[in-house]
């Protein structure tokens, strides 16, 4: 029945769009030239290319905007200022980005607020996402397919709701931007200085208008292949911290409280003592392939009507293989000796207990990620000038994204089985010193480098196979109008209604729920040499591996191929396990995991009315947007019946059969807004804005999922995904901006903003809870609506070009933020306190040069990870890029680009303490050489 209902809505919407087209033709035939303003609102000044032209268009867009907005425009048809859309956005005031493997920009934050507070649209249409949430991953979208981007920081009733930080609207080019036949073909090659890996890209755009400029077409193509490497280190198992009595921190020392004096008691000087739990070091190798195809057809039979049909399809194929060495020195009684403690942290200790389960047992960790994302967006848009006072617009679109990785990601560990002694020391570097000496005279570092270790030195261990299938589909329709009143200060009235139907599903496929991840570990481990087939193939060293990190730790890898390892395990079927039953690979294979799978549907109606006002020196608008959303969420639950101990820190949970859970919710929000633009002089203007805005919870937070997978390694934690009754973030926000257009294509602006966020979503942490599992207490984490949060900030920006071709762009944003959960004051996660950048340009004659640096201060990424006041934070980073191009003639030019010229790494730590590193990701500097031919 719901399917029929949806189809009727779409048939009605389609019929309305067709009727709009037909009616406009009748009107044109009956009325002839009516004197109405032409539909074409696009500027034809896209004749100035290069950096100067891009800056000029951005300044004009800001000056003409009806609210606080910053923009960036293509250098010319098919050429964006940076190879990555997110990198270009990072030059805009108040914008910061996070990066994925290889250093490519992926997620975007505005005014310090994280990606979950930001909404991304393409030509005003919401983009489907391949992740569990709503935040768009910009690495799936080549920059070649867009002509510009607007970062809208203010709010208007006519704009799509769903953003508190900012609304990012990407724009595609129109064949009528520059009439006639035009095109560009571009070939690029790149090389990374750290990894010594290469890439290549072919892109092209063709545009033409014909039939007396009544029909226009535009086609685009991007084909890219690139090899990336990311050196990484991390603290997967987290840090161990002793309990602190009379507080909410009960400790997370799974093997027992850290006990330097060995008396078996928690002494006062041991309260809150911190030590390493697990750490790893390695490298991610990625073979990235990306393709994109775009098409747009525009029909303009007369000055009063326009019909646009357009489409975008992209595919990102980026499988990753991570070769890592993992160390698990978690404290247990009699496991450590010779401990050294500094400022409440165990910085050094020895591991010399001969018990096989007490020694270090270094591990080979092979972690793979299968990420293939297909994203499509198709739509039709019609605009009709009914008369000189009334314009109607209709839009239909379908946006989809799919990523099917179910069971194809791996986290596979082989564990060394040779007697050894080890020394661990925290030095303030991102990897601790690790010295392992084996009883037979070998040592870990030189043995790996010289190929001294073979299959017989390893046992099978953790064998996790997982991955999710995510499908996101958004169908949208809108109808809007603008009536020009032209009565005194009442300029016009805008009105409209939109309907959005979003359906997102996630199916997790893994082997953790059935205990398959531990099937070959503990007492059931197999010596790798018994598997045959040379599972461990060879040792290898990567060029410049961790060359920026000092310390004494292995820098060579042993390679083993996960598919070949799986085949060897399957071939071992029939051999008897210690309990007498035969090994059966099928018992370890991944299956559908209902506990973390879900179906979420959202149906949203929104209507708005906005009055546009103007006077002699001012303009503005006031409006109201009404939003109603109905949510349906389905997930599954299964109770834990038993927990089986397989060995030290190795457990299997036995679950009851899953049962379906369905939740429904509905909410209605009124979102008023007002904006004022006052022209103090012809070059100086003041903007004021006030609005109520909202941002919906991340999709996965609406599903009543839960997981207790951490039981497998001895951390008894239950993590709830969320529930459908979570309320959206809502905010009362205020903006004031002073803009001085002191020269042509130049601007200096100063802005302040304040946001009072209600129902902000954060995570609770409830240690020591009884969830009905005999003999075990669990830590429980769940997303909750907090009380409120406050965010205030200021922005300063400068953009100026001199007549001699030199130019500068600079921006600075400062944020102050605090959140409150109950009586507890916390930092607001994901908000950078300051972001600033500086760009220098030269664009004159055939030569164009630019140098840009973007800096993001450290910010909190997770609160209370080791108790109150112990927060994980992203450390500061500065990203420097450069671009040079030379125009050989009117058809041909060459370009040279550099990324991450300072060879910066993304790093994470606890409270910025160098003795408590959380993560390290180094991408290296890369250079790209390109050649373009235009006609």
Image: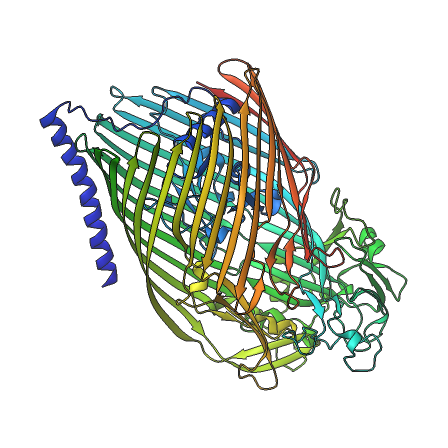
| Residue 823: quadrant of the picture | bottom right
Q: Which residue is situated farthest in the bottom direction here?
A: 774
Residue 83 in sight: no
Q: Position of residue 720 (x, y in %)?
A: 50, 70
Total tally of numbered discs in the picture: 0
User: For this rendering, which residue is in front, 344 or 474?
Assistant: 344
Q: Which residue is situated farthest in the right direction here?
A: 441
Image quarter of the C terminus: top left
Image quarter of the N terminus: bottom left
User: For this rendering, which residue is in front, 899 or 400?
Assistant: 899
Image position of 186 (left or right of 711): left
| Residue 208: quadrant of the picture | top left
Q: Position of residue 883 (x, y in %)?
A: 60, 27
User: For this rendering, which residue is in front, 320 or 174?
Assistant: 174
Image position of 545 (left or right of 886): right
Q: Residue at x 52, y 40 (%)?
A: 86
Query: What colour scheme has been applied to the protein in the rendered image?
Result: rainbow
Residue 112 in sight: yes
Q: Position of residue 267 (x, y in %)?
A: 79, 79
Indicate whether 347 appears above or below 815. Answer: below
Image position of 102 (left or right of 639): right
User: For this rendering, which residue is in front, 795 or 389?
Assistant: 795
Q: Position of residue 644 (x, y in %)?
A: 62, 81
Q: Residue at x 61, y 41 (%)?
A: 227
């Amino acid at each position: 029945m719901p399917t029929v209902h949806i189809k009727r809505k779409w048939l009605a919407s389609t019929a309305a769009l067709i009727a709009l087209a037909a009616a406009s033709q009748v009107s044109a035939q009956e009325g002839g030239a009516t004197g109405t303003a032409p539909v074409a609102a696009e500027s034809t000044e896209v004749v100035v290319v290069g950096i100067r032209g891009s800056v000029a268009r951005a300044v004009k867009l800001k000056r003409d905007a009806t609210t606080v907005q910053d923009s960036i425009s293509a250098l010319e048809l098919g050429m964006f200022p940076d190879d990555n859309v997110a990198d270009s956005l990072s030059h805009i005031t108040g914008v910061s980005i996070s990066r994925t493997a290889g250093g490519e920009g992926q997620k975007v934050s505005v005014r310090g607020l994280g990606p979950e507070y930001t909404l991304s649209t393409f030509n005003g249409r919401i983009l489907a996402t391949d992740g569990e949430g709503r935040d768009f991953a910009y690495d799936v979208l080549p920059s070649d397919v867009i002509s510009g981007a607007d970062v809208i920081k203010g709010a208007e009733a006519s704009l799509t709701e769903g953003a508190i930080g900012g609304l990012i609207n990407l724009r595609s080019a129109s064949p009528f931007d520059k009439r006639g036949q035009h095109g560009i073909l571009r070939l690029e090659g790149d090389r990374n200085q750290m990894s010594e890996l290469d890439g290549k890209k072919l892109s092209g755009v063709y545009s033409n208008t014909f039939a007396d400029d009544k029909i226009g077409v535009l086609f685009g193509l991007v084909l890219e292949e690139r090899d990336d490497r990311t050196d990484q280190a991390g603290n997967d198992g987290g840090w161990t911290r002793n309990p602190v009595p009379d507080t909410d921190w009960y400790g997370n020392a799974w093997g027992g409280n850290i006990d330097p004096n060995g008396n078996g008691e928690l002494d006062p000087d041991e309260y809150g003592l911190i030590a390493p739990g697990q750490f790893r070091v390695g490298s991610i190798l990625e073979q990235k392939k990306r393709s994109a195809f775009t098409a747009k057809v525009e029909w303009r039979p007369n000055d009063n009507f326009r019909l646009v049909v357009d489409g975008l399809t992209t595919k990102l194929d980026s499988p990753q293989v991570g070769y890592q060495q993992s160390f698990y020195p978690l404290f247990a009684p009699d496991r450590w000796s010779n401990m050294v403690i500094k400022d409440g942290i165990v910085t050094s200790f020895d591991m010399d207990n001969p018990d096989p389960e007490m020694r270090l047992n270094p591990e080979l960790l092979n972690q793979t990620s299968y990420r293939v994302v297909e994203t499509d967006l198709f739509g039709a848009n019609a605009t009709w000038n009914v008369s000189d006072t009334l314009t109607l617009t209709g839009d239909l679109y379908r946006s989809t994204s799919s990523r099917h990785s179910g069971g194809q990601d791996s986290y596979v560990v082989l564990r060394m089985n040779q007697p050894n002694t080890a020394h661990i020391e925290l030095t303030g570097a991102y990897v601790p010193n690790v010295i392992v000496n084996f009883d037979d005279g070998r040592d870990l570092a030189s043995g790996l480098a010289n190929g001294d270790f073979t299959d017989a030195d390893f046992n099978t261990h953790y064998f996790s196979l997982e991955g999710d299938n995510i499908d996101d589909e958004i169908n949208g329709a809108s109808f809007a109008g603008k009536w020009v009143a032209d009565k005194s200060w009442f300029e016009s009235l805008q009105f409209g209604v939109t309907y959005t139907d979003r359906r997102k599903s996630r199916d997790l496929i893994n082997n953790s729920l059935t205990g398959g991840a531990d099937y070959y570990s503990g007492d059931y481990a197999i010596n790798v040499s018994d598997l045959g087939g040379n599972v461990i193939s060879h040792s290898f060293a990567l060029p410049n591996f961790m060359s920026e990190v000092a310390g004494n730790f292995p820098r060579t890898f042993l390679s083993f191929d996960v598919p070949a390892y799986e085949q060897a395990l399957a071939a071992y079927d029939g051999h008897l396990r210690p309990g007498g039953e035969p090994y059966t690979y099928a018992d370890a294979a991944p299956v559908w995991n209902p506990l973390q799978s879900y179906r979420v549907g959202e149906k949203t109606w929104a209507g708005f009315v906005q009055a546009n006002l103007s006077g002699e020196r001012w303009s503005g608008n006031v409006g109201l947007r009404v939003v109603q959303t109905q949510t349906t969420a389905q997930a599954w639950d299964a109770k834990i019946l038993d927990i089986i101990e397989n060995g030290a820190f190795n457990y299997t949970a036995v679950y009851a059969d899953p049962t379906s859970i369905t939740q429904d919710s509905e909410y209605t929000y009124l979102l008023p807004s007002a904006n004022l633009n006052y022209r103090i002089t012809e070059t100086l203007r003041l903007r004021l804005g006030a609005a109520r805005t909202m941002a919906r919870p991340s999709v996965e937070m609406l599903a009543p999922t839960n997981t207790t997978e951490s039981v497998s390694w001895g951390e008894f934690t239950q993590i709830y995904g969320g529930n459908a009754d979570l309320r959206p973030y809502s905010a009362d926000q205020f903006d004031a901006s002073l803009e001085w257009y002191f020269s042509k294509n130049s601007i200096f602006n100063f802005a302040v903003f304040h946001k009072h966020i209600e129902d902000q979503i954060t995570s609770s942490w409830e240690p020591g809870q009884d969830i009905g599992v005999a003999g075990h207490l669990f830590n429980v984490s769940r997303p909750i609506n907090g009380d409120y949060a406050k965010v205030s900030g200021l922005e300063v920006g400068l953009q100026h070009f001199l007549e001699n071709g030199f130019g500068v762009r600079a921006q600075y944003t400062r944020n102050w933020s605090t959140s409150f959960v109950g009586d507890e004051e916390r930092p607001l996660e994901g908000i950078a306190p300051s972001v600033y950048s500086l760009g220098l340009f030269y664009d004159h004659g055939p030569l164009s040069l630019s140098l840009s640096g973007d800096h993001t201060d450290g910010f909190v990424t997770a609160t209370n990870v080791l108790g109150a006041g112990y927060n994980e934070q992203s450390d500061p980073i500065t990203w420097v890029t450069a671009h040079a191009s030379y125009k050989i003639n009117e058809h041909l030019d060459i370009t040279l680009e550099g990324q991450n010229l300072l060879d910066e790494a993304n790093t994470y730590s606890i409270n910025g303490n160098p003795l408590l590193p959380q993560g390290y990701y180094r991408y290296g500097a890369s250079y790209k050489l390109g050649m373009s031919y235009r006609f």
